[in-house]
Image: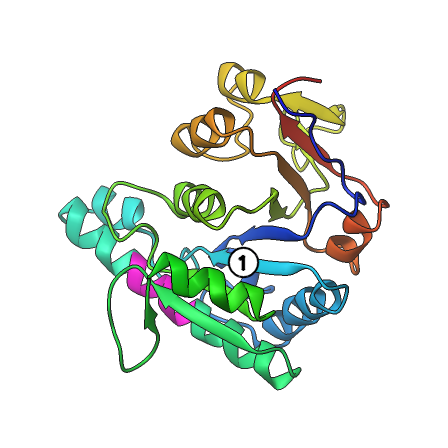
Amino acid sequence: MAEQNTPGDTRYKRVMLKISGEALMGDQGYGLHPPTVQRIAQEVQSVHAMGVEICMVIGGGNVFRGLQGSAQGMERTTADYMGMLATVMNALAMQSALEGLGVFTRVISAIPMDQVCEPYIRRRAVRHLEKKRVCIFAAGTGNPYFTTDTAATLRANEMACEAIFKGTKVDGVYDKDPMKHADAKRFDKVTYDEVLAQHLGVMDASAIALARDNNLPIIVFSLDEPGGFKGILAGEGTYTIVQGKK
């Protein structure tokens, strides 16, 4: 097994940033909160300015979540497609914010909708990254029953990303919910198999297994910490790294 990169290592030239749709809501219970979208865009811009090539996948849970629709009686495949369309809306909002900051950005959808974004063609997406454009991959994998976590891991592998940065509301992986338990313990490092065996909730099982099979580290950090994304790439900050061995 190849030696894992660590945050701050200059070998991190291309990364995948995965954030939830809920991260764009701010304190609202639904939809997009423009100041929050702008703040996250500024975090991305600061890392882009370091010369890092950035891929992004944004969930759609702030607009529509397929599993919730299915639980309310909607046919699962239809609900999942609706969730994929929600991710396109979020991707377009993030593209607008990034380009307002002078960062050239492409939204690339697994479901073709040529009037609003590009279809997914791997070689074209790689070329965008080489030209220092941020690529936001939307519409999941294009298939129902797969989460945006799995889509992020799939695209990260296809784009030869060196790590997945999972932005959450907490500063790493804990043995239990730190929002509910004051004695929750944070891990500095944890293995893929421990995440699966202990149901630590980093990503769904398919995404973790895909990352493990391709030796792709997952760095879990707080998206609410100003400068957190850039700080970790500079070798600072608090985070948990999920990898093959401790």
Residue 144 locus on image (x, y percent): 23, 46
Q: Which residue is drawn at 61% across and 85% down?
A: 100
What is the three-letter code of the residue carrying label 1?
Cys
Q: Does the magenta stretch include residue 85?
A: yes
Residue 93 locus on image (x, y percent): 48, 75
Q: State whether residue 63 appears in this view.
A: no
What colouring style does the render use? rainbow
Q: Give the range drawn in magenta.
A: 84-90
Residue 230 locus on image (x, y percent): 77, 57
Q: From the viewer's perspective, tell me whether residue 18 is left or right of residue 149.
A: right
Which residue does the numbered mark 1 point to in the structure image?
55
Q: Which of 12 and 83 is in front in this view?
A: 12
Tag count in the figure? 1
Mark 1, Cα crowd under 10 Å, few <14 / some 14-19 / many 20+, is many
Q: Which residue is drawn at 62% across and 46% down?
A: 165
Q: Is residue 118 above or below residue 137?
A: below
